[in-house]
Amino acid sequence: MASSRPPPASLRSFLDAHFASPEDLASAPALAELLRRECVGLDASLRRLEAQLASVSASWLARSAGARASLRRIRSRGGGFGVEEDDGEETLRSAELPALVQEIHRIDAIRLYAEAALQLEAFVGNLEDATFSIIRQASKLNLSSVFRPASNEMQWKQEKLLQAVDAMRDIELELLRISTNRPQWTNLIMAVDSRVDKTLAILRPKALTDYRALLAALGWPPSLSSPDAANNKYSEIPNPLVLMNEANKEKYSQSFLALCALQHAQANREARQCQAKGASASMSDSKYFDKTAAYFDNGLWAIDELVQPIASRLEYHFAKWSEQPEFIFALVYKIARDFMGGVDDILQPLIDQARLVGLSAKESWVTGMVKMLLGYLERQIFPVLVTSYQAADDKFEVHSSWMHLNDLMITFDKRMQLLADSGIQKIASISEGLSRSLSVFSIYSEHSDWLHMWAGVELNSAQHKLKSEMEDEINWSYSIKELGQQEITSNFLLSTREDYKAPTISEIVVKTASAMIERGHALPNRGLRIQYNRSSSVQFLNDFFLVLCERCEALQLTNTALEDDSLLKASFAINAARYCEYVLREWDDDIVFLEMGAHRKHVDEGQGQGHKHSAQHPCSFFGNEIAFLAKLGTDYLEQIMSSILLEFEDLSWDYVQNIGLPNEQIHPVDEVLDEENLGVSPGFVASLEVLRDRTTKLMLHLNSKDFLDLWRSIAEGLDYFIYSSIRWGELTFSDQGVVQLRVDTKALLHIFRPFCLRPEAFFPFISDSLRLLAMRKTDARYLLEVLKNAKENDSCLRQQGLQHVKKDEQELMLMHMHLTLSLQKRRGRLHLIRGNQGLRGSSKMGNCMGSSKCASASAPLESKVTRSSYSTTTTDNTSKASQRSSSAFSSGQFSRASSDESSAAPSLSSLKSFNMGDLRAATKNFGSNSFLGEGGFGCVYKGWIDELTLAPTKPGVGKMVAIKKLKKESFQGHKEWLAEVTYLGQLHHENLVKLVGYCSDSDSNKLLVYEYMLRGSLENHLFRRGTQPLSWAMRVNIAVDVARGLSFLHGLENPIIFRDLKSSNVLLAGDYRAKLSDFGLARNGPTGDKSHVSTRVVGTRGYAAPEYVATGHLSVKSDVYSFGVVLLELLTGRRALDAARGATAEMLVDWARPHLGDRRKVNRIMDTRLGGQYPKKQAQDMAALALRCLHHDPKLRPAMPDDVLPQLRLLQQNTKPSSSSSFSSSSTSVPTHRSRPFQALAS
């Protein structure tokens, strides 16, 4: 241990003056006894250390002598190079050398460890000596305070404190070296840290106590009342720090610097410990001592001690202003401002002298004041507010108080930030910590429940204001007068509400949400801002978007009789969605939301949750909301297009059916028609007038980008509709007919001429057809020869400007126009609207009109408007279908298929056998754009095939189908595939999903091709959020359809048990007709006198009959039980199985059974989404029927054909038809030779 330094001169002079002789020591016996005990203790410590040193030295000498002897032996053995050694000695030497080297390394490590331990022992001893010297000095003050000048005593304490700080620095440097070079010496580091922590636990309170005593001596804290308060003249409060004389300023400076040095040393210790634990990864790239800056952001000890005594005086005034918090904030701000000048003038030079880089006296002072206020709010104000919030029934007053308090906090934060602004640039990685310490809103970081309450208050207030605005119908419209005198131009760079022609309500919503977001900026870190915004502004926007969606759904745009008011309201709703989408995209690109999005993504990935970001950059904050708005606008833009096309079809149907027929050629054959003076066909005028009216109004009220896409898609759809309606294979056009068609086409093009210079470019099929019809006979004959004989005729067609009409159709047209040839084969008409594909659905072949916003405003509605298609199935009479299926069963086809499940698919004449290449072409190679969903069977894709030939077509041509693709590794899926082909290949009924065909190739590819069900599954309509609730009449009709399907299966000569009836297996067509799907688990019923069949238990829990689950006995009554569960779902709107209802009511049947038997309790279980709009007696009758179907005894359950179906038909007859449902369950005849291509859009 280093020799102690001689005492300073002041101490020696003091000792010489008071203890000149041994007799003087007798005057202080307590001091003498204390000195004697200390000497005895020091002597004992010295002897103990000498003994330890001797023991360690002896041990080291012994090891050193042993090593020296070993080296001497090696040298003696290997010294003579000419001496030969035997193999044994050489082997022994080779084995001893590594061990010897290892032993030397071990000895050296022990030596280094001992040196480090001794060095640290010395440093820790210095720290403990300095600390205990200060403590002992304090105990001596009572004995000899009269003999010690205060200045000398303070100076001596500061010197000892600085010695302790120096010792801490030495310890930290040594520990840092050890942790870097010898990280395995963790026990040594932990032992030293433990001793230092114990010492600091004594040293820091003592240093702070001395600092407080000095402040008290200087007159701190000052009086909070100004000298002129009696005369009602308030001025700044005098600052004792500014009024100090030079001597006191010197004392204060020494104490301040010593306390700062101690805090800096402590910060270094914490930085080193955090670095060892990996807790400061965000600052790992900076130098070691730069990391300590982050530990001063919560304030300096010296400045915090200035704030503490002020806080005790301020709380006296705070208690009187609990109902007027604005006075509390004002007083804290005044105190902080009045003392700011003195703090900056006196303390900032001292901070610079202490070399605390990057620290500001202003910021530290403001931080201390904010922490003081924060503590009072957390203890006194917020608990009272939270209690009132939780207890009050009428929360309006509490909401007002909370929002008022937050307004005061926001204003206070801004004012304090201005006071604290020192111009010092902070490191980006620690800026979050700085803002946290300076913000009163950091109170929410410790109380997340308070943050959610605040967000709820903001949300409630915003919704209350918006509700009154939404009730005013004027706010939902946009008047052209708002544009003033400016001209309506084709501006596609839209940025304002006026550009989007959005209604006033959209701007109100945007401004309200923006205000909520702006208030959230006051929160100190990104995590809190994310929580606040997701619970307030984002929820507020989502609620409005749902209201917007509900308003659009209520317009019923799919009706053929389109009303002008509905068209305008839909336009305004689309404009509002597009404007809100634009605003959200702008917000999403802001750096604040980019950081929040990246932070949320990082948190989700750290928790393994994986956040979904739709169509936006990976750090999108409003990604889901933007996707919803894009889909909302696109969906209803599609509906507008569909409605206009349907309306045009209805008005022009007779005209297009008679194009080219002789009775249309009212002029004599030899008459030369004047095309300029010839009028439009009378049957075409009404449809053109309505089309002109619709497009003109849409141009005025719809935003320019969407209108551009809409009119182009309408033009494309009309072009293909008219072209495909003309029976080219049956007609021979005369010159008069060609001229009349050209005149009518010009009238149609004239409607679109205000929107573009060459509208004929958007009618390619009609233009090509007219070009062919107007061709000279010689040119037509030449072209016909080219089409017949040339193998490469594409270049010839391009030279003639014919690019859209197919070659075989061109050949057909030329033959019938000029060569008067007859065509044996009659070509059917395609059922299609040329528009966009965006149809998406679930794995059950459902559909929801998909969307994604158009990337370019100049492109047609290629990615925005859906080309809708529908599947036309010939509806047969139930009895005839039953007879056909019965004959199929009696022929033994089913039995043969079932007996050999490993064989190839059965050869069924009613099904199309597709090859894998056809289905790849129909689905674009099973691409992601065709993907609909995935289930246990496999994946489901959408595809397009020709209605007549069933050959694959390009997207948008023909009819859409749903294609199930079996997973190759699924053996059970193969059995279900075979069952579906077997049953649906021979069963035909209007309430069974139609199987179009199948695929089974040598590569084990198993696929099924179904008709496409436009409305998706019943499960989605009952349980999915955001869907329009089904009316009572629609639910009764669906129940009747399901019962008809089951009655058909049960009424066969050999009954079929469906076995897996549930709401997800009930699919809805475009007219909401219900059909049974998924026959993979279907099973032949019992034969002969058997009442049941025994089979392995499969199916779905919650729907399966209890006797089937318990015994495996399956009968048609098992389907009746499942039908009763589906009836319950239609009645209650609840899932058949829901763990949220509790263990005793998890099953819907168990939960509802007590209410079904009592007609007075039925209304308690009815679906709340019906809003009470249902006949109570009918609901009671259906509940009673469900209870019978759910009977525990299968024998007491009603039969589907004889009991259940008649009762439901009676209910249906007494039910008022739903305004939103245009279907009935009765059979309808659809002409098979000519179908109307837009009919599917009526649904």
Image (spheres, helix red, strand yellow):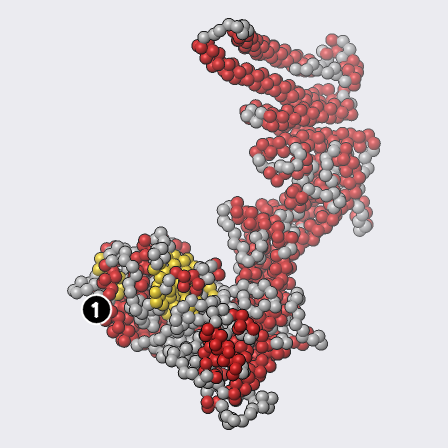
Residue 765 in the image: above or below residue 418: below
Side (left or right) of 791 relative to 482: left
Image: 16 above or below 956: above
Q: Quadrant of the N terminus?
A: top right
Residue type, label 1: Ser
Q: Nearer the viewer, residue 379 or 538?
A: 538
**Residue in the image at 38% along x and 76% along y:** 1224
Is residue 358 in view from this perspective? yes
Residue at image position (39%, 79%) is 826
Label 1 crowd bin: few (<14), some (14–19), many (20+), radius 10 Å? few
Give above or below for 176 relative to 1145: above
Residue that sits furthest to the left in the current view: 1089
Q: Position of residue 231 (x, y in %)?
A: 81, 50
Residue 709 quadrant: bottom right
876, 754: nearer the viewer: 754
Q: Which residue is mark 1?
A: 890
Query: Between residues 197 and 513, which one lies in front from this camera angle?
Result: 513
* In front of the other: 550 or 368: 550
